Image (tube, grey):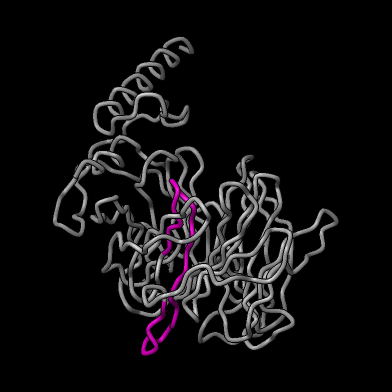
Amino acid sequence: MQQQHQQTARRSASSARRFLKKNVGIALAVTATVAVVAAAPSASAGTGKTGHAYRGAIVTDVRTTEKFDFDAGEIPENIHVNRDGSMNLSMLGSCVGCERTQKPQLIHVSPSGERTVLATGQVGEAISGNTRGDDGTVYYSVWARGDLARNGVYKLLPDGTSQRIAALPGDSGPNGLALDPAGRTLYIADSLQGIIYSVPVSGGPVTPWLTGAALERIPTEAVQLGANGLKFHNGALWISNFNQGTLLRVPVTATGAAGPIRTVTDGLTNLDDFSFPAPWSDVLIAAQNGTSSRKGPDRIVVIYPNGTYKPVLTGADGLASPTATAIRGNQLYITNGGLPEPHDAKVQTGRINFPALLAGAAH
């Protein structure tokens, strides 16, 4: 029986490799995880921006792996999945329109579900973005509006204490974080002022790296957030704008400066954080947090390099204000803030069917 399973796995791996070479032009960059992904049962799927319809369930086996107490301030906002399968989660503590009586936290959840508090903020603050360097250093944003002594970005020190490495103006809203590929510079999305800041990971003065109307919030929105999620990928910094519903790509020049802003796609109301399933592909999976401001649906969408997109999960799959996605291997992780009643704050996981995911990349 074991030999039969091994033969089946080898056949699935071979099939996945042939598919990727034929449809995406990838001959050598197929990861081991993708190679063992078996195709999910065929199912009809929704349509994307240009009306194309693709077949095949892209995300399957969706389930809740961690549940949280919304009333206690356990409102998941951002996620980083570590190499061992553990998670670092930003907990807001409170939300826009919520009574601000809870302290935000950055927590670590082991693969077995054991929770450890890594950092705690103060009442009235929010811990928003978090990321982790290749050296293991954890960085996180503290949104302490109006508090010059607290607002900014912090890193965890080996002794478990935190050090602020980037002090931001009191009217800024530090949110998404991204490290450059060399691990020397940290980039910060200011969701209130529409600025991408840069700062050395060792700390120091922040520098406005990118500004412009494409990063700004819309003042008439109930929840006013501009530049939100950040990721470095394939020589560019990718940015989501929450209010404008856009995904932006900004090439990074040889000198480290920002190139011209290109809008990859638009029309995705309340586009939140996102992640890339494969380092060699510009296909990404993003959270569309509609119920956070009652402006649209809660969805997980796949966005293709040509700007088309496709919903792959909806409220029918249990989404409740999805704020971010993360990917490790063929596993998709989704943080849900649980803003609508009954405040179902949680982390969900699902399995990515790579052949179905990448089939749309040719359109």
Q: Residue furthest top?
A: 3
Q: Is residue 117 visible?
A: no
The residue drawn where x is 35% and y is 22% is 12
Residue name at image x 42 percent, y 40 percent: 278
314 with respect to 63 (left or right)? left
On the image, the x and y values in percent for residue 276 come to 43, 48
Q: Left or right of 138: which side holds 40?
A: left
Highlighted magenta segment, given as a residue range: 216-239
Point out residue 304 in the picture as x, y percentages from the top left corner: 29, 50
Q: Nearer the viewer, residue 21 or 96?
A: 21
What is the quadrant of residue 363 in the picture?
top left
As for residue 232 lying within the magenta part, the answer is: yes
Q: Is residue 49 above or below residue 328?
A: below
Left or right, 66 with reference to 6: right
Most extreme residue toward the front, as rendered?
A: 255
Q: Quadrant of residue 152?
A: bottom right
> Residue visible at 32% across and 72% down?
269
Q: What residue do we see at 42% from left, 31% from top?
A: 34
Residue 82: x and y in percent read: 62, 46
The number of discs equals: 0
Q: Residue 80 magenta-drawn? A: no
| Picture quadrant of residue 291 | bottom left
Q: Nearer the viewer, residue 304 or 100?
A: 304
Where residue 168 appears, as percent x and y from the top left, is 64, 77
